[in-house]
Amino acid sequence: MNLALEAHSLGKRYKRNWALRDCSLQVPAGRVAALVGPNGAGKSTLLNLAVGLLRPTEGTLHVLGRRPDGDRDLLDRVGFVAQDTPLYPDFTVSELITMGARLNRRWDTPLARDRMEQIGIPLDRRVEGLSGGQRAQVALTLALAKRPELLLLDEPVASLDPLARREFMQVLMGSVADGDTTVLLSSHLLGDLERVCDYLIVLQTAHVQLLGGVDELVNEHKALTGPRRQRADVAGVAAVIRESHTDKQTTLLVRTNGPILDPAWTVHDVTLEDLVLAYLAYPAPGRAVLGVAK
Amino acid sequence: MIEFLLDGHSQVAPYMQLVQQVKQGLRTGLIEPGDQLPKVRSVAESLAINPNTVLKAYRHLEAEGLVEGRPGVGTFVRRTLAGPSLAGQAELRRELVGWLRRARTAGLEQEDVVALIQTTMRATFQDDEKREEIA
C-alpha cells in the first residue's frame, strides 16, 4: 500500500507536556482523511510535524516517503493551510499569487487565477477586505496552486458559517476529483467532515484512539441490545467500546471480529458519529490503536 | 440529466442514496438507456462529498448491469428498470389506490398499512422465489 503519511511511535513534548505521544498511524495515498479530536488532542501538532514546522521529540515520521524537516524538495509537494488561514492582510489577492509563484518551484498561476475568478474573488482586493469565508477560499486556492500530492488543512472550516463551509468543501471535493491529491484535514467536529472523508483518525489526549477506512470501521462496529446481564463473552465480539444498562436492558457498542449469532442480542448498525463519540469517551489513554488500518 | 440530492439525516449511506436515486429515475422513466449520468467531479462538487462516494455508487450500478463506464467519456445508462410498460404501472396504481381506501375504511392507520404491505411483500416474494427454485 502506498502511504502518503506514516508515523511510528511519534511523540512531541513541549517542556513537560506531551502534545503527542506514542502515535503510530498511516494515511494511504489517494484518501481524504479526517483527523478528529477535541481541542488540545494533538491535531495541530501532528500537522505541524508533517510540514517540518516542528521536530519530533521521539519516533519517526515519513511524508510521501521522506522525513519532513528541512527537506525542500518534499515541501514543494505538500500544501498546508494553517489554522485560521494566516495571510498578509495588506496584500492583494493578485500579490499573494505573485508571491506564491516566487516562493514555490511548483506553481500554477493560471490555476490560481482561474479559481479565484470561479469563486468570485476579485484579484485586486486586499486580504483585509475579504470575508472569513473568502479568506479561507484564498488560502485553499493558494495551497492548490502548488498542485500538491498531499494537502494538509488544519481546522479549515472551524471559523466559517454554514454556507461558507459548504462552498469551501465544494471547491475542495472538486479538486480532489480532478487529481490524485491525498488530503488530511482536521476538525474538532466530525459533522464537518463526515461527508467528505473516507479515512478516519481519532486523536484523544495526545494518543490515537481509532484509525481506519470509514466503510471498514462502520462495518466492523455494531450496537447490541439485549436483556440486562453482566458482561459476558459474546462470540464475534472483539472488544466492548461502551456499555450501558437500565434495570432491564443492556446496550453495548462493540468491535466485531465475526458475525454475532447469539439470539439474545439484537444487532444494530452504527453511524460514524456514534462510533467517534464512543471512542472519544473510551477511557485508558495510552492503549494501543484500536481500529484496524486496511 | 438527473440531479442528485443527499439527505444528511438519513440512515442510508450516501453512496446508496445515489444508487437509489438512479434506480428511482430508471423506474419512473426519468432517465433512459443511452442517457449520461452526471460526471463524478460535478456530483462531488455540487454535493460537497468525496468523489470516491460517487465512484462507489457508479461501480455498484455497473455491477448490477444498469450503467456502463466509458473511460474518458462518462457513465451511461444501459438498461431501464421501468417495467414492461409504464402504462401497466398506472393500472396497478389504480388498484392500489382502491385497496388503500378500503384499508382506511377498515380502520387501518398509515403505519398499519406500511407494516402490512412490508410483511406481505416479504412473505409473497420469498414464496415466489422458493417456487422458482423448485421449478
Image: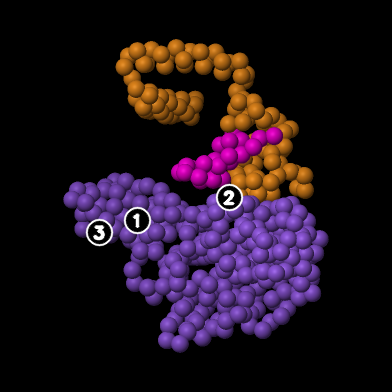
Chain colours: A purple, B orange
Q: Earlier in the sequence, mark 2 or mark 1?
A: 2
Please identify the quarter of the rendering in which residue A198 is found. bottom right
Q: Which chain hosts label 2?
A: A
Q: Residues within 10 Å of mark 2 (few under 14, many from 20)?
A: few
The residue lying toward the viewer, choosing from A196 and B61, is A196
Point out residue B86 in the picture as x, y percentages from the top left corner.
61, 19
Residue B134 bears which disc, if any? none
Q: Is residue B44 left or right of residue A58?
A: right
Q: Nearer the viewer, mark 3 or mark 2?
A: 2
Q: Residue at x 62, y 70 (%)?
A: A86
The residue lying toward the viewer, choosing from A256 and A208, is A208
**Mark 3: secondary structure:** loop
Asked whether residue A149 is drawn in magenta, I would say: no
Q: Mark 3 and mark 1: span between their CA atoms?
A: 14 Å
In this rendering, is residue B93 above or below A263? Answer: above
Q: Residues within 10 Å of mark 3 (few under 14, many from 20)?
A: few
Q: Is residue A267 left or right of residue A71?
A: left
Q: Residue at x 69, y 46 (%)?
A: B42
The residue lying toward the viewer, choosing from A184 and B77, is A184
Query: Residue furthest toward the left?
Result: A247
Q: Nearer the viewer, mark 3 or mark 1?
A: 1
**Mark 2: secondary structure:** helix
- Pointer 1 residue: A253
- Pointer 2 residue: A163
Which segment is the magenta one? B1-23
Q: Earlier in the sequence, mark 3 or mark 1?
A: 3
Mark 3 vs mark 2: tell me if same chain. Answer: yes
Q: Mark 3 and mark 2: span between their CA atoms?
A: 48 Å
Q: Is residue A104 left or right of residue B14?
A: right
- Pointer 3 residue: A232
Mark 3 vs mark 1: tell me if same chain. Answer: yes
